[in-house]
Image (cartoon, grey):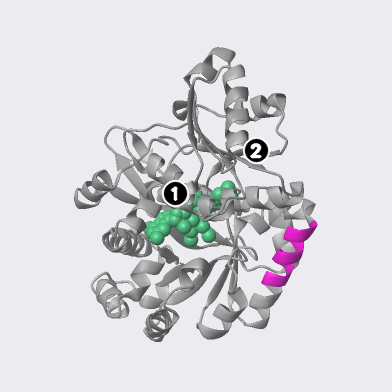
Amino acid sequence: MISDDLEKISCLLVDDDPFMLKALSKMLEAIGVQGIIQTDNAQDALKYLANRNNHIDIVISDLNMPNMDGIQLLRHFGSLGMSFSVILVSGEDPRLLESVRSLGEQQKLNVLGTLNKPVRKDDLEAIVRRHKPVDKQTPSGPAAMVFADELQSAIMNDELEVFFQPQVSIDDGRIVGVEALARWNHPDKGWIPPGIFIGIAEKYNMIGDLTDSIFQKSISEAAHLRSLGFDITVSVNFSAQVLCVLELPEILSETIQSSGLESSHVVIEVTESSLAQDMNITLDILTRMRLKGFGLSIDDFGTGFSSLEQLKRIPFTELKIDRSFVHQAAQNQASRAILDSSIDLAQKLSIECVAEGVETDEDWNLVEELGCDTVQGYYTARPMAPADFITWAKEYGLRRQS
Ligand code: C2E
Ligand code: CA
Ligand code: CA
């Protein structure tokens, strides 16, 4: 970033220590940042960010605060689905700070870096300079704050679409399925990725309508692909909030019946974190979905807290390993160990194992060596519109033959 650009940056400082607030604020001024807002608690920070008239580029937050610690705050930032970057400051052990940073990334936050107290001006400046202005952010595109009312009309106006990302068998490279991923085709802002709007849909009770729309589209597109001869399953993501509607298995079955697909062609993906609440109702719903023949996948496996217990209680047919344990696992001892045991666990439970986030041939070779069944990731293909999938699959088939 060129130096003049720092003038245009707006920073929100969150720290319960008034001296630290003052010190950080002085350092930011010294490096040329002009828009500086200070708050001494997390609640005020969230309130400020939630106001659509306020624009913040970077939130610089202390990790240890009374009432809401930095990790809880990160979770709230994640659910706001907003586009600011985050810098974390703490007096704790640098390794702890690093783990929190990676938690932030799992929440799909753009964590620019971490700073140990006492903070040095040069270090602060170096990290602030990593921030990219919104219009230059890639690939998430329009990272502007997105609001519930706009999303509501997008759902009503049918601006949500599904992209399909292929899943291929490790054994022979055959395309065995697609995961349906929501995209918002915004009339002004272009394609908006789900990281920006799913959290808002969940927070403002729109996730039911959203899931309904995405499920219907996924089913009709998948039915079309099967009619063209593609022997594939379609996986659809379900959030916690929709897993409390007791009639859900019946509603899904009805949608399937009129489509020409069978329930065994459909996999319901649920994330572990979404399983934490109202376990009895969720268990009831998921078990009846399974009885009706739907596949059930435990998504982002390894990132939750009670994975093993969930696996015991819910009749999953598939375990989907989170990409943080897959990509570059060959170079990371901890990721590799978790990847290895997750694959082993799937084999012992006789359920399918899918590795997400395979980006390189090194990633592919490792999951193959460890005995995984199916791969999904940029190495094979990025998510694409269903019509593009047809063209891609034909070319992929030709490449496989030669
Ligand atoms: P997810 O279910 O874990 O979906 C996989 C995400 O990983 C997708 O991001 C996909 O584009 C990305 N991905 C796939 N391969 C690679 C790779 O090799 N490297 C990397 N770095 N990323 C890869 P996407 O489409 O942005 O979706 C993000 C999340 O939004 C999804 O994560 C899912 O949790 C949520 N989501 C998407 N569509 C829906 C939906 O219809 N309903 C609900 N409830 N959630 C959805
Ligand atoms: Ca998923
Ligand atoms: Ca996943």
- N-terminal label among 1 and 2: 1
Q: In this view, does 149 lie above or below 283?
A: above
Left or right: residue 227 versus residue 83 is: left
Which residue matches tag 2? 113
Which residue matches tag 1? 43
Circle 1: residue type: Gln
Asked which quadrant contains residue 319, the reply is bottom right
Residue 338 forms part of the magenta stretch: yes
Instruction: Name which residue lies at 32% across and 79% down.
Output: 249
Q: Where is residue 216 in the image (x, y as percent from the top left)?
A: 28, 63
Tell me which secondary structure the magenta stretch mostly adopts: helix
The quarter in which the N terminus is drawn is top right
Instruction: Name which residue lies at 41% across and 51% down.
Output: 390
- Residue 165 appears anywhere in the view: no
Residue 310 image label: none
Question: Which one is nearer the viewer's eye here, 125 or 382?
Answer: 125
Residue 94 forms part of the magenta stretch: no
Circle 2: residue type: Gly
Determine the CA span between mark 1 and mark 2.
22 Å
**Magenta residues, start to end:** 333-342
Q: Dot 1: what SS?
A: helix
Q: Position of residue 7 (x, y in %)?
A: 51, 17
Give the mark toward the camera: 1 or 2.
1
- Residue 28 appears anywhere in the view: yes
Question: Which one is nearer the viewer's eye here, 349 or 382?
Answer: 349
